[in-house]
């Protein structure tokens, strides 16, 4: 159902408020560059610092700018199940193609708690749900067994898997139906995970190099594996540079260097340290991105 190089887009700010014009231009840049889908209001979109009203406005702006040309998968997760339900219902009303729902952070629910949480969210609306497992951010890992049980829910259609554990990826793919969509949540594992059977990636790097990320997917799918591997290694320095500090700090800094947004974050995120900024600028220059 969902595949390819899908961008987890940043949320640009200007003087503390949403920069609507810049966000719409980012969507156009992505679509013009071949991106296969757009995820607003995820971790990369600084969703934790968006008010409910801003969260809804970002979804609306991205949907309007995309104009139905690519799927929009709205981030609607929360560590409060009622909030996740409310945001997911809004995504459905707004016309999103699907909702990306993260495992509850900080609460550290058990696997039974995760099952109950996601079943509650999926049961509240019929929009397709993509689970999001990122234990490095949330403090809890959703096991392959739990994902397999949730794959039995009709509108839970996939998972963004960002545990970094390829054994777990294999278990998920082996234990879920063929139509279940496994997407990489780690840019550096995009190519290896496709070899295991993943359908694509929800990517930070696509913010900065969308054409190359789309090309990596496209060449792999048509069987040009050697070319796809070459692109993977071409992108390798950028994969690392964009995680020199907490995401999305490097991604937003890179986009500012490229002249696409203002370099503005919401606390507790802060500007890059000078040494890391210079390292990022060096990679962008070497790749002729800025």
Image (cartoon, rainbow, N blue to C red):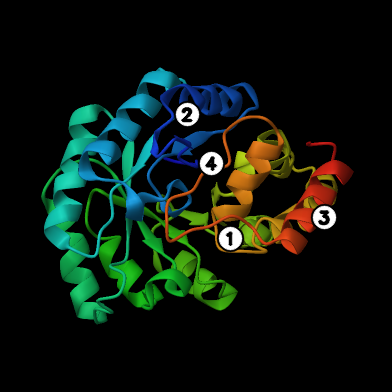
In three-dimensional space, the C-alpha distance between marks 2 and 4, rounded to whole angstroms, equals 13 Å
Which dot marks residue 186? Answer: 1
Disc on the earlier residue, 4 or 3: 4
In three-dimensional space, the C-alpha distance between marks 3 and 1, rounded to whole angstroms, equals 15 Å
For the point 53% across and 71% down, which residue is it?
Answer: 170
Neighbor class of circle 1 (other Cα within 10 Å; few <14, some 14-19, many 20+) is: many
Instruction: Quadrant for the N terminus, please.
Output: top left
In three-dimensional space, the C-alpha distance between marks 2 and 3, rounded to whole angstroms, equals 29 Å
Neighbor class of circle 3 (other Cα within 10 Å; few <14, some 14-19, many 20+) is: few
Asked whether, in this view, residue 283 is left or right of residue 254, the answer is: right
Q: Is residue 186 visible?
A: yes
Locate residue 107, reporting x and y percent: 24, 76
- Residue carrying label 4: 7
Mark 3 secondary-structure assignment:
helix
In three-dimensional space, the C-alpha distance between marks 4 and 3, rounded to whole angstroms, equals 19 Å
- Residue carrying label 2: 23
Q: Nearer the viewer, residue 276 or 195?
A: 276
Seen from this angle, which residue lies furthest right?
Answer: 286
């Amino acid at each position: 159902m969902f595949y390819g190089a899908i961008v987890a887009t940043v949320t640009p700010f200007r003087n503390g408020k949403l920069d609507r014009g810049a966000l719409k231009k980012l969507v156009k840049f992505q679509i013009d560059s071949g991106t296969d889908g757009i995820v607003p209001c995820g971790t990369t979109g600084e969703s934790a610092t968006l008010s409910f009203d801003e969260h809804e406005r970002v979804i609306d702006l991205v949907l309007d700018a995309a104009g139905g040309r690519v799927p929009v998968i709205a981030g609607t997760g929360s560590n409060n199940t009622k909030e996740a339900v409310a945001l997911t219902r809004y995504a459905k009303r707004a016309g999103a193609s699907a909702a990306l729902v993260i495992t509850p952070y900080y609460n550290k629910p058990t696997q039974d708690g995760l099952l109950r949480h996601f079943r509650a969210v999926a049961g509240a609306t019929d929009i397709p749900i993509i689970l999001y497992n990122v234990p490095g951010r949330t403090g809890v890992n959703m096991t392959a067994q739990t994902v397999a049980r949730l794959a039995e829910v009709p509108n839970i259609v996939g998972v963004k898997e960002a545990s970094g554990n390829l054994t777990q990826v294999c278990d998920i793919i082996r234990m879920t139906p063929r139509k279940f969509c496994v997407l990489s949540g780690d840019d550096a594992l995009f190519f290896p995970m496709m070899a295991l059977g993943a359908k694509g990636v929800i990517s930070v790097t696509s913010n900065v190099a969308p054409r190359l990320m789309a090309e990596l997917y496209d060449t792999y799918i048509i069987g040009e594996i050697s070319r796809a591997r070459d692109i993977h290694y071409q992108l390798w320095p950028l994969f690392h540079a964009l995680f020199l500090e907490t995401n999305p700090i490097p991604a937003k800094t890179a986009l500012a260097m490229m002249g696409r947004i203002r370099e503005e974050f919401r606390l507790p995120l802060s500007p890059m340290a000078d040494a890391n900024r210079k390292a990022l600028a060096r990679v962008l220059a070497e790749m002729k991105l800025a």
